[in-house]
């Protein structure tokens, strides 16, 4: 018996399975779209918050800078008054203490400003790059570098130190012969009359 043709096996009635799969795929697509829109809105909110925080920090930093400048002038005036005998040293110490306190606050606000800039950078999609990981991924020469072995310590130190003596040379650059004489000395002995 001969059989010609391609065997086809397919259900004739799917009872709405294809329509159900289509609805399921459309629902998954709709859910992905909503998730994407939510992520976009969240990103805009984070950027907006970071910009507001950075502006507030800059305003605070500017006000503290003016306060530091005023207290520096006050401390200089107090020192001048003390040097000329008009006030006691307690006024100078009080002015410097106030100045140092405001300078400390100013420095802390600078740190807050840097943190605000980092937050803005991260909110805008930036991220940290670990230099070692990046070099490992690209296969840099740093990855292939090996540490010197204990027996190679002398050679490694000579390579590391510029101007270090080569094997068989003293620090003047003269080569040594068999008995510790420099090659220069042995050559002069060979040319001397006996």
Image (spheres, grey):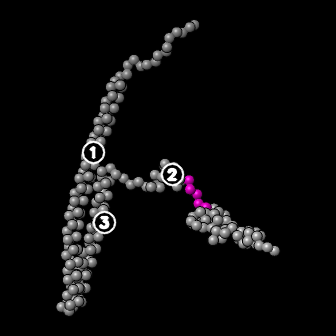
The residue indicated by pointer 1 is 40
Residue 153 shows in this picture = no
Determine whether the residue tagged by mark 1 lies in a helix, strand or loop. Answer: helix
| Chain part drawn in magenta | 144-148
Gap between marks 1 and 2 measured at Cα: 37 Å
Across and down, in percent, residue 29 comes to 31, 35
Q: Residues within 10 Å of mark 1 (few under 14, many from 20)?
A: few
Gap between marks 1 and 3 measured at Cα: 29 Å
**Picture residue at 23% right of the left edge, 85% below the top:** 79
Labels 1, 3: front one: 3
Determine whether 36 is above or below 189 in the image.
above
**Picture residue at 22% right of the left edge, 57% below the top:** 52
Closest to the observer, 175 or 184: 184
Across and down, in percent, residue 137 comes to 48, 49
- Seen as rendered, the residue at the extreme bottom is 85
The residue indicated by pointer 2 is 140
- Seen as rendered, the residue at the extreme right is 194
The residue indicated by pointer 3 is 111
Quarter of the rendering containing residue 156: bottom right
Closest to the observer, 31 or 20: 31
Across and down, in percent, residue 11 comes to 41, 19
**Picture residue at 21% right of the left edge, 74% below the top:** 69
Location of the N terminus by quadrant is top right
Question: First in sequence: mark 1 or mark 2?
Answer: 1
Determine whether the residue tagged by mark 3 lies in a helix, strand or loop. Answer: helix
Across and down, in percent, residue 178 comes to 76, 69
Determine whether 115 is above or below 10 in the image.
below
């Amino acid at each position: 018996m001969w059989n010609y043709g391609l065997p086809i096996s397919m259900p004739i009635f799917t009872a709405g399975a294809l329509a159900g799969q289509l609805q399921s795929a459309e629902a998954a697509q709709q859910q992905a779209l909503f998730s994407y829109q939510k992520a976009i809105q969240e990103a805009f909110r984070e950027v907006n918050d970071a910009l507001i925080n950075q502006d507030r920090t800059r305003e605070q930093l500017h006000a503290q800078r003016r306060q530091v400048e005023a207290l520096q002038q006050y401390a200089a005036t107090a020192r001048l008054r003390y040097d000329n005998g008009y006030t006691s040293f307690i006024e100078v110490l009080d002015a410097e203490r106030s100045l140092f306190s405001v300078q400390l606050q100013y420095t802390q606000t600078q740190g807050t400003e840097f943190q605000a800039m980092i937050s803005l950078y991260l909110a805008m999609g930036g991220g940290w790059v670990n230099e070692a990981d990046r070099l490992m991924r690209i296969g840099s020469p740093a990855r292939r570098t090996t540490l010197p072995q204990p027996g190679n310590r002398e050679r490694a130190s000579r390579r590391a130190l510029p101007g270090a003596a080569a094997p068989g040379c003293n620090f003047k650059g003269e080569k040594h012969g068999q008995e510790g004489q420099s090659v220069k000395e042995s050559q002069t002995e060979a040319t001397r009359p006996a």
